[in-house]
Image: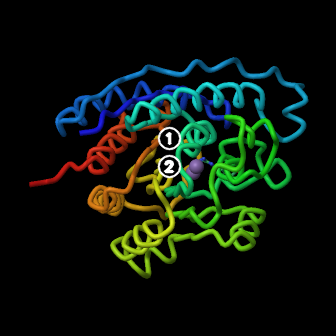
Amino acid sequence: MKKISIIGVPMDLGQTRRGVDMGPSAIRYAGVIERLERLHYEIDDLGDIAIGRAERSGDSAVHSNLRNLKAVAEANEKLAEAVDEVVQKGDFPLVLGGDHSIAIGTLAGVAKHYKNLGVIWYDAHGDLNTAETSPSGNIHGMSLAASLGLGHPALTNIGGYSPKVKPENIVLIGARSLDEGEKRLIKEKGIKVYTMHEIDRLGMTKVMEETIAYLKERTDGVHLSLDLDGLDPHDAPGVGTPVIGGLTYRESHLAMEMLAEAEMITSAEFVEVNPILDERNKTASVAVALMGSLFGEKLV
Ligand SMILES: NC(=[NH2+])NCCC[C@H](N)C(=O)O
Ligand SMILES: [Mn+2]
Ligand SMILES: [Mn+2]
């Protein structure tokens, strides 16, 4: 059985709410290692990536609508190297966030090992903004765009190559808060999206069956990027940008179980867990429970 290498990324510079840098600790405290060991995986906890300091206000990056660009880019370079090494060894990289800007580094480390990496972006948001379209200047809302090669070169060129993923190899699940520029990009690039509307109409079973079939025929590996705000804030309150009307705990477990059954996920990250905004570490615990299902836990 494959070894799972855990990498923590205590990143909070891709957005402005304090506390999401404690996500990796909260997830470890919620028992991620024990949970996966029970499934007979060997776990290698590689610790946390060092994150630099935030820029002082007045910095030019703030005015270019890319908050903390330098520190975010540097941390992602380090993360990309760490993830690259894990994949090279033949182990499974499991990245714990931290805000969603870290997907840039994770994908940079993973994608070079595949011709056609698939990406499942489980999220209330598209994270498809660039500095030009971003309403906030927060890089956690730009990570998927950067991985498509769109945006500032300091972000698109992490790992020394671009793009990391092709638009037709991406599936968005759970979207319900998309900015105008993101909607335009989705149409222009033909990115597959299951918004909450489609999930309500089809049901999660059908959505996952379609997603799995779609990615199976065109990809040679699939990265799961799971933003806890994809879930409804009732089930995952500890996130910085909650959006009501989200995926339930049950739907999310079903999705993870179907991915486990399909044996198609080759790397994963769980991001945006913010213990300061959480209720008794509920969101971190939900993340760990979902990881259990993703790695093959069964009820009976
Ligand atoms: N990873 C996230 N939680 N992203 C939220 C992004 C929110 C908004 N679309 C923005 O670009 O600012
Ligand atoms: Mn989100
Ligand atoms: Mn996100």
Q: Is residue 105 above or below residue 291?
A: above
Dividing the picture into quadrants, the one containing residue 45 is: top left
Q: Secondary structure beneath disc 1?
A: strand
Amino acid type, residue under disc 1 in the picture = Val
Is disc 2 surrounded by few (<14), some (14 to 19) or many (20+) residues within 10 Å?
Answer: many
Dividing the picture into quadrants, the one containing residue 186 is: bottom right
Q: Is residue 21 above or below residue 161?
A: above
Q: Nearer the viewer, residue 202 or 294?
A: 294
Q: Is residue 292 above or below residue 77?
A: below
| Residue 165 rendering spot, x and y as whole percentages | 62, 54
Residue at position x 49%, y 26% in the image: 22
Q: Report whether the residue tagged 1 is closer than 8 Å to ligand 3.
A: yes
* Residue annotated with mark 1: 271
The N terminus - image quarter = top left
* Residue annotated with mark 2: 225
The C terminus - image quarter = bottom left
Q: Earlier in the sequence, mark 1 or mark 2?
A: 2
Amino acid type, residue under disc 2 in the picture = Ser
Q: Report whether the residue tagged 2 is closer than 8 Å to ligand 3.
A: yes
Q: Nearer the viewer, residue 12 or 186?
A: 186
